[in-house]
Each structure stands twice: as C-alpha cells, then as structure tokens.
Image (cartoon, rainbow, N blue to C red):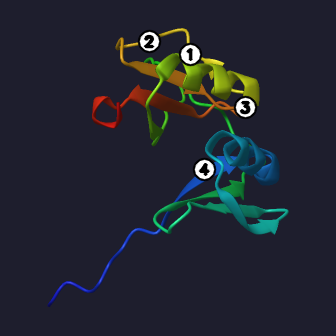
Amino acid sequence: MDRPNLRPNGMVLDAPDPGALRDFYERLLGWERGADEPTWATLRPPGGGIGLSFQLEPDHVPPVWPAGAGEQQMQVHLDVAVRDLPAAVAWAEQQGAKVAAFQPQDDVRVMIDPVGHPFCLWLDEDEN
C-alpha cells in the first residue's frame, strides 16, 4: 500500500475554558482567530502553517513540570523561538503566563500557561 498524503495541520490543547486559553495564546503570539465556539476555539498563524486549537475538557488536570513518578505528565508542549529571551519572558508574564520553577537550560525558559500547560521560549541564535 502506498502512503496516503498525510499532513499535520494543528495542535490541540485541552482546557476548562477553550476561549480563554485561545485568548491567552492570541495575545502571546499575535495570531488571528478561527473557530470560536463554547467547546472549540482556534488560532491561525499568519501565512498559514500549523495552527493551535483549544477544546473543552471540563476535567482538565494541569501537568506537573518537571513530572515525577505517578504525577500528571505533559503529553506535548509548544516551543516558541524568540530573539530576545528576557523580553519574551516579560511579555509572556504580562499576558498571564508564569515562569516554571525548574529551568533546565540557560537559553530556554519553561513557562506555564494560564491552565497549566508548559511551553518553552527558546533563544534562536540564528534569528539574532
């Protein structure tokens, strides 16, 4: 059998309030809104590419970072390339993110979004 044409077109994050989490990432990234329903909200990046979706999960349990044995582990996280790490951290905090207590690298800041999903801001040396 030949491989069919498969193309990832999005990433989905669970949230107790999809619209509120979409609003956070909209402010953080500056992307435009797509779907806006009580159980499903989306963002689209400028110029196309993989977007973000947010789906209702009323029983959402935030992952623990870093995870320990028997604790809720993250299934996926976003990596966001930045040119100025301190400015990006300050911007993310202003939008409602928190800096994670554990930081594994000097050129990366693990952040926690308003419902507990970790995401990384990393210094992209090629962009400087």
Residue highlighted by disc 1: 100
Q: Judge left or right: residue 104 versus residue 36.
A: left
Separation of marks 3 and 2 at Cα, in angstroms: 18 Å
Give the mark nearer the N terminus: 1 vs 3: 1
| Residue 28 position (above or below residue 30) | above
Q: Nearer the viewer, residue 123 or 75?
A: 123
The circle on residue 74 is none
Give the mark nearer the N terminus: 1 vs 4: 4
Amino acid at the residue labelled 4: Leu
Residue highlighted by disc 3: 114
Amino acid at the residue labelled 1: Ala
Q: Judge left or right: residue 13 versus residue 105.
A: right
Q: Residue at x 74, y 45 (%)?
A: 21
- Label 2 near label 3: C-beta < 8 Å? no
Residue highlighted by disc 2: 103
Q: Judge left or right: residue 75 versus residue 114.
A: left
- Label 2 near label 1: C-beta < 8 Å? yes
